[in-house]
Amino acid sequence: MPEVLEWKSITGTVSYRERIMLTPAAIVTVSLEDVSRADAPAIIIAKHIIEAPGQVPVNFELMYNPAIIDERMSYSVRATIYEGGEAYFITDMAYPALTRGAGDSIELALVPAAGNSSFFGTNWELSSIRGETEMLTSNEQKPNIMFHTEGGVSGFSGCNSYTGQYTEADDQLELGNLMMTMKACTDPANMELRLMQALNESINYKVMGNQLRTYTAEQEELLIFNAVTAEKAAPANAVESTSE
């Protein structure tokens, strides 16, 4: 009889220190890599994708074929959290696994990915209000906001354009009174009102990759904006397994 392959697994958690909530569209990838050769790219041994992971810490079970593990080699586990197809959090250090005294249970601490969009001068397009993402405007143009370097702010509410002033320092934000045009629009979800209320409550902000998020003084998440950039590719789809 042919030998039955017995897969083994590496288990652990993926987390980060920042007090930032993941959206339902977030994707977590965890991979086992052969990092034995310092002069060559790592070889991916196994990869797992977790869709709609919820909030950190995210538990994972990474299945691998033990027959291809060589005790003389070095292996490491790496993780990435994607939001909107962009790397949002990444591992920035090696997490040894399986050989050379390393085990099969690992806690991965991720850090923000490099390449943040600038808070200033970026066209930030609204993605979520208080965790709600299904929002349609009367003309299908998404609300947006732009913070100019000289202290001015301008944007589109979903119906009307608005302008005003703001102050910013150390990730803290204060918006002055906003002046709006007086166009009448069909807005059954009261999105314009909800957006303006959330902007007025926004005290803190954080730019992570191509996302801008605003918070209350108690760190309750209010608004999520995405930087308007060229369409980026989604993470690679060569995976061993996927879970939801």
Image (cartoon, rainbow, N blue to C red):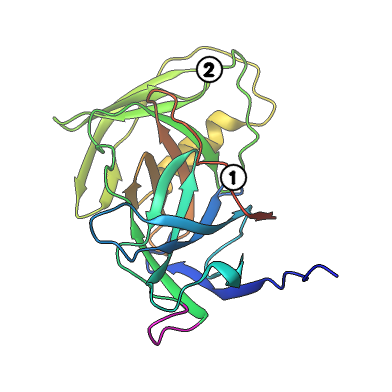
The one nearer the camera, 37 or 146, is 37
Q: Assign a secondary structure to mark 1.
A: loop
Height in image: 198 above or below 1?
Answer: above
* Image location (x, y in percent) of residue 7: 68, 71
Q: Residue at x 71, y 73 (%)?
A: 6
Residue 86 in sight: yes
Residue linked to disc 1: 25
The one nearer the camera, 3 or 110, is 3
Asked if residue 219 lies left or right of residue 93, the reply is right
Q: Quadrant of residue 54?
A: bottom right
Secondary structure mostly seen in the magenta stretch: loop
* 181 in magenta: no
Residue linked to disc 2: 141
The one nearer the camera, 167 or 104, is 104
Mark toward the start of the polypeptide (2 vs 1): 1
Tag 1: residue type?
Ala
Asked if residue 82 lies left or right of residue 186, the reply is left
Quarter of the picture holding the N terminus: bottom right
Q: Which residues are magenta?
A: 98-103
* Image location (x, y in percent) of residue 30: 51, 60
Q: Quadrant of residue 47?
A: bottom right
Q: Residue at x 48, y 47 (%)?
A: 82
The one nearer the camera, 166 or 128, is 128
Furthest residue to the left? 150
